[in-house]
Every structure is written in C-alpha cells, then in structure tokens.
Amino acid sequence: MADQTRARRHAILIGINSHDSEDGPGLKGCVRDVEEITQQLKTSAVSSLSIHSFTATLTSGSPEPIEKRDKWPTYDNICSCLSKVTQSSNHGDHVYIHFSGHSTVVPPAHSFSNWETGDLALVVLDGQDANDRYFHGSEIASHLKAMVDKGIAVTIVLDCCYSGSTLRNDEVVRCVPYRPELDRKYPPRFDIVSETGPSRHLLTRGSRQAALIPTWLAEPEDYAILTSSDATERSYDVKFKDGARHGTLTYFLLETFDELGGIGGTMHQLTESVRARILAHRHNHQTRTQNPVLFGKKTQLFFGLTSPSCQGNIPITRFSAGGTTEDAIRLHAGAAQGISVGDQFTLHPLSCDDKVLPVQADAIVVRGLTSDLRITSPSPNQDAVETGWLAKATTRLLLRQFPIRLHLDDASCAEWRSALSRSPSLAEWDGHAPPFFTITQHRPAPATTTYTIQDQNSKTIITATTPAQAFIHITHLATFLLTRTLSNPSTDGSTTLFKSSFTAHLIDDITQETHTPGCTLTARDQHTVCDHASCAMTVTPADKLRLVIKNLADKDGPRLFVYLFAMGSSRYEVEDMTKASRVAVPPAGGDFGGSGMFQRRMRFSLEDEEEECEDLIKVFVTRDVSCFGCLEMGALGERDAEKTIGDGNNRGGLGMGGDEVWGAVTFRIKVVRGG
C-alpha cells in the first residue's frame, strides 16, 4: 500500500432532491446531506483531497436544478467523473463515493444478478431536461471493479433504499417504483460489464477453506459499501431535531464522525455504531425498521483515514427501562453468539479518548440475540455510557466446557493454575471426561522451553514458545470449538415453530445429491452438531455445491436473516462467507418478490500438502437483525488471528420487541483428493 501521507483522495458526492409526484412526496434532504459531508471532510483536514460534488437543488417554480449544468447529477457527468478519477488515480489512492437520493429495483438480467430480490439502480438525471434516468448496479460495479483492479481503495455510502414508497407521518421513503420505460429510453450499457473472463461459477478464494462462488465482484479486496438498509427495508428522509430533513444513514454517520473527531475509522465499527443509533432512534417504529448493511472488506478504513478506534466489536444501546429510574444497557449479542449469564465485558466509546476509560459490566440476562448488562464496579464514566458504544467480551464462561490437561512440571503447573484462576473463561481438566486439549512442556535445550498443544486424539495442533503464547492459542482453539457447537437446544413452542419455518440443504450441482445438516444417525433434529464420520458429506475440490436456504413462510409471512460462516478445521479460522452484515430472505411471492430462497454456489479446496480435511459451513438464521461479526477469527497462529472483526487497531435489531428466535445448522464437509 502506498504511503498514506502521500495518497491522494477523491470524494465524489451526489445529492438529488426531488419534487412531489404521483409516486409520493419528494426528497428534501439529499443536497443537505452532501453539503454536510463536504463540511465534515473540510473540518477533518483531509490531506491531498479533491471533492467532486453533483447536486440537484429544486425550487417550486422550476423542474430544473438551480446548479450549473456541469454540476448536475446526470448519468454522463457522474460516469465521466468516475472514469477521470480512475484514470488519474494510482495504486494506494482512495476514493469515497456518497449517494443520497432515490433508488429503485430493476428486474434481474445477468448471471451475476440478485435473482431473489432484483438489482439496485440509482435514480439520477438524464442531462437533457432533468428527467430521471437509471444508473444500474451493474454499471456502478464496473466502475468499482476498474478502481479496485488498479489498486484504489474505495468506500461507498448509499443513502437510498430498494423497495416501495409511501409517506408515513414526517418521513419520506427514499425509493420510487421501477419504470420500465426509462430502461427502454436509456438501455443500460451492458458492454460496460464484460460477460467474458473468469466463469461466474468457478470463482474461489485464496484461503484453503470453503469458498463461495458468488457474483463476479464479490471479492472484497479493497472496497467497502455501506448501504442504509437491506433489500427488504426502506430508507427514510426524516426531519430531525434541528428541524431540517436528512437521510437517516447520513445523519447518524455524521453524528458518529463528530464523536470520533473527524471522518475515519474501521468500517465494521462504524456500521455497528451507526446501526445502534438508528435502531434507538426508531425504537417506537418497530414496523419500519432500518438497519444499515456493510458489504465488502469489513476491516477497511473509511476513506483510508485512521481514527482512535476502540477495542469493542459488539454494539450496545442504552434506553429507559420501564418501572425503574435507571437506564438499561442492552448488548446486541446473546445465546446465538455464545454469550452466557456472568460473562464480563468492557464498554468503550467509539473513539479512544483517554479521558473516557472503559466501563466494566457483566451479563445479567441473556436472550436469543440480545443481553442485558449491569455495570459491575463504580466508574466515573459509567453515566457516559450511551447508545453507539461498543462492548468487548473479556470472559466467555461457555469456554469452560473444553477443559485443558496440564502435562507440565510442578513450577509450570502452579503458574498455569494461577493464570487459570484469574481467567474464568478456561478450566483445567478434572480427571473425569477426556480433556479437549493437552499442553505438554518440552526442554529441547538448556534454557529453552516449548509447549505443544494436542487435541483429543493426541494430535499436535500447534507449538508455542512461551506460556503467554500457549494461553492465547488455547483460548483461540476453545473459542473455535464453541462456535462450532453453537445451536439452539430450546424446545419451546416459538423456537420449534421457527426451526420449522426454513430448510437448509447442500446440493451437488452435477449429481443433484442433497445433503442435510446435523446428525443423520440419531433421532435428533437437523440443528444438532455431531462427530460421526458418516454424517459428513464427502467432496473433492472439483465438486461444485449449491447451498439453498428456503423461507417456508407464506407470502405475508416474516422475512429471515441469514449469517453464513466457513470454519476451516485445519486452520481453526472462522470467516464470513457472504462478506455482508447479513442476507435478507423474504418469503416467496411477498411484497419484495423473489423465490423465497437464498442460494449460493461454493466449492472446497485443499492445501498442497493435504490429502483430506474437514471443513464446516455454519449457518445462523434469525427473524431479527443481530450482530454476528464477533464470531469471526483469523487462522490459528497467524498475526492478529485472535482479533475479531471490529477490534481496535483496524483489525479485523435493537431487540426491544419480538421473541428473538434463532436457529443454527452445521454442514460437515470432508474434502478429499479426486481420483
């Protein structure tokens, strides 16, 4: 990466107000969004910055914007700017694109289209008489690909939405119905998106574990896209307390930058903090939720700008609890993420302000997707805890189910037992059930000590050179096993009903053989996790599989949210396979159209020296939005492997209502060399 002090930055800001029409009330806050983003960029003193603004300010007496034509947000002006910026930029430069305005959904038309919900198109101007024209997602993606291929890091914010338009009270939805006559008048330039090159069905990632075969632009090398909602939600143009209209996403993004002291920060942390703020703002509008979605590289810095980021990775909200005089603190993670009563956390403001020290808290109530926290020790900053802060787990009591056998000399045993007593997350083997890990001490030379960590089958996993390093490795391994075993054992009515509301299968694209998750040798349901060899699906690196998750609700039923992880059992890593905060799956035939299914192709690979291995596909399904980024882990032993997405140093639903039901299914995949 180029020297960040010399990197050039281009901000392309687009804001398009609109008049009232037969489709609904017009947007009044889009130009203001661009003006305030511009002011924030200037206030942040961003170096080597060029700002390219295209805005449409409308007055009641004219259909045309008051700006000069070369500053209109027309299709040609925007395309020209994107191309010129790409041509003039070099490897290591940064581009920030911010769009505030209307969008629509166009019918899927490509092999890489979203056939479940349709494709996004931004509504821009045609350049002739300021009428509407579509800027198709495929065209946007082509410009993005050209930038990424050149080594330019791209940050995109889309403050618009995907679906229908209505006026509700003081809110205007940022979307208009699709008008096919616009596409007939201005056909999308399909030649911009090459249909040649690598097969859309053969893409794999560099890591050894399972890889999705997604859309052609799914690899998040150097881009991050923050959208104001998913394909099943609406985005709102709202009149806030200042009396002016703003896009909801832009408003709270700017509020977050104010807390940070300027533009910058890790994309995942920004997204979760902004989402918590929006949910708190909308807690009285549970039927009109708006949850931002982050696509691409979660650890990327916003516009390549650093900020004093904190160590948290789970958002919290603070709200008034009924019948009490104290505010309640809600953690946006629960049993689905492996949280248990008694787990301890530190709470951090988004910025690392030395004057605001972390606050200690523990979990006193754990639900499916959220938990209630209680501040455990008096702190001068406890009253400062507010919505948008982030929490970091400091203990995980469920890790104690994976005990450790100590095969050490007396002095080292005493040292380890002292460390274990200070860390309630881990437990020493009690001599009964077999231990999950064994730590053995070796002295290959005088004054040299190493520690090997073995699994239940006495197979060496990794060797450490210090007790501290071994302790980190053991915590990583136990956390991996915890994620592997996560499932919802509840048999209450709502959970049972929810588990029956969806199906999940892996299908061989050639033989059409269908594999179900869970254990096939017992009478337990598909949500269990087992170790039977016969329950694993055997594949080769050449096999192409298709994951299908189906929402079984009728057309008026609830949507589902899917979170998909690949777990490499030889590298002990947990990686998000969708590269998105979540995937929404509405029912078939409902308001959002689609098939009611989430489908993704994938294949599995082996390292050069491997003859076989076992990988896992972990699928979490919920009815409410939640945060699962805290489950991600890098490979065991690699630098920063123990740092989950959203931790500091740029590492990698509010839950007030609903029953927080969830389910988790696990596919075990045995990968072998082909004949």
Image (cartoon, grey):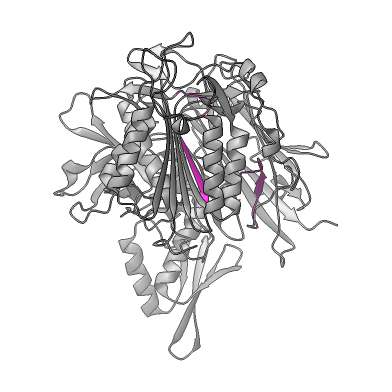
Number of dots carrying numbers? 0
Whether 182 is drawn above or below 521: the answer is: above
Which residue sits at x=51%, y=66%? 637
Question: In this orientation, does residue 388 appear?
Answer: no
For this orientation, the residue located farthest to the bottom is: 446
Q: Is residue 355 left or right of residue 628?
A: left
Question: In this orientation, does residue 461 appear?
Answer: yes
Tell me residue 304's x, y (percent). Answer: 42, 53
* Nearest the eye: 182 or 245: 182
* Nearest the eye: 151 or 377: 151
Whether 494 is drawn above or below 250: the answer is: above
The quadrant in which residue 614 appears is bottom right
Magenta region includes residue 212: yes
Identify the magenta region. Answer: 207-234
For this orientation, the residue located farthest to the right is: 675
Tell me residue 626's x, y (percent). Answer: 44, 35
Image quadrant holding the C terminus, namely: bottom right
For this orientation, the residue located farthest to the top is: 22
Whether 639 is drawn above or below 162: the answer is: below
The quadrant in which residue 14 appears is top left
Magenta region includes residue 112: no
Tell me residue 64's x, y (percent). Answer: 44, 19
Q: Is residue 215 left or right of residue 300?
A: right
Tell me residue 220's x, y (percent). Answer: 56, 49
Magenta stretch, overall SS: loop
* Nearest the eye: 406 or 385: 385
